[in-house]
Image (cartoon, rainbow, N blue to C red):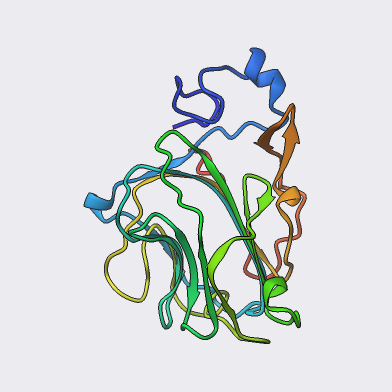
Amino acid sequence: MSLIRANGGGLGGAGAPGGALGSFYSHLLDQSLKFNDDDTQYLSRTPASAGNRRTFTFSAWIKRGHFGSSQSFFSAAGNYYSFRFNSTDTMTLYGNGTDLNFQTTRKFRDPSAWYHIVVAIDTTQSATLDRVKLYINGTQETSFISTTSQLNAQLAFNNTVVHTIGRRQSTTGNYFDGYIAEVNFVDGTALTADSFGETKDGIWIPKDTSGLTFGTNGFHLTFKDDV
C-alpha cells in the first residue's frame, strides 16, 4: 500500500508522483508493509554484534488497523522490551520496568490517521525527561502517565538478541495490526523528528533519510519490492 498513491487511504490520499500531490511532497513513500494480527505476522533480526545500547533512535510511519488490544510495533528480547500500543490505546515505551517505562496520556485510535512516531533514547542524560523523547507527527509528547528511565541503563535494544517489528519478542502475542512504512533505526545518536520529516503548509510530511549516519546496527526499511 502506498502512502501517497492509495485512493484515500494513504498519507495525502490519491495522487501520482507527477500530479499535485507528487509535487507537494519532497519525498514520496512508495510502499508500506501490512500486518494482520490474526495471521501472527512479524519481522525479526538478530544483530551480529552489540551497538550502542544507551543511545539510539527509532522512527516509523504507522497506521493502526485494530484497537483495544496490546500491540507491539518494535521489540527486543529481554524483560518485555517493547514499543507498543496498549489495550487502552495509549502508547508505552517499556523495558524491564525500572530501565524504561514511559506511557502516554494521549490515545491513538484514529482509524484514518498515519502517525509518524519517533523515539529518541539517551540514557546518559541526567534528567529523566531528556533520556526518553517521543515525537508524534513532528511534535514532542509532553503528557505521560508514567516517566521511568534509569540513568545509564543498558537496554536490550541494540544488543545481540532477537529484535522484531510487528510483535513483542519476549512472549508470543501482542501482534501488530495495520500498516508500517519507512522504518529507520539509528544506532548511537538520539535524533529529533526533524531528521525524518518536515512541516509544509502546516502538514507534517516525510523527507529523505538516506543521508543519515545509521551506525553499527542501524537500518532503513522502505519495503519497496526491489530492496
Q: Is residue 44 left or right of residue 93?
A: left
Q: Which quadrant is home to the C terminus?
A: top right
Percent position of residue 200, x then y: 74, 30
Classify 178 as above or below 130.
above
Q: Is residue 24 left or right of residue 67?
A: right
| Foreground pick, 17 / 131 | 131
**Number of numbered labels in the structure image:** 0
Percent position of residue 76, x then y: 46, 73
Say which residue appears at 74% left-offset and 60% top-offset: 191
Classify 20 as above or below 158.
above
Q: Residue furthest left?
A: 38
Classify 5 as above or below 184.
above
Q: Is residue 220 visible?
A: no
Say which residue appears at 74% left-offset and 26% top-offset: 201
Q: Is residue 170 visible?
A: yes
| Foreground pick, 113 / 73 | 113
Say which residue appears at 76% left-offset and 60% top-offset: 213
Q: Is residue 147 left or right of residue 73?
A: right
Percent position of residue 100, x then y: 54, 78
Q: Residue furthest top?
A: 19
Q: Quadrant of residue 17?
A: top right
Say which residue appears at 39% left-offset and 37% top-offset: 111
Classify 168 as above or below 192.
below
| Foreground pick, 158 / 117 | 117
Q: Which quadrant is home to the N terminus?
A: top left
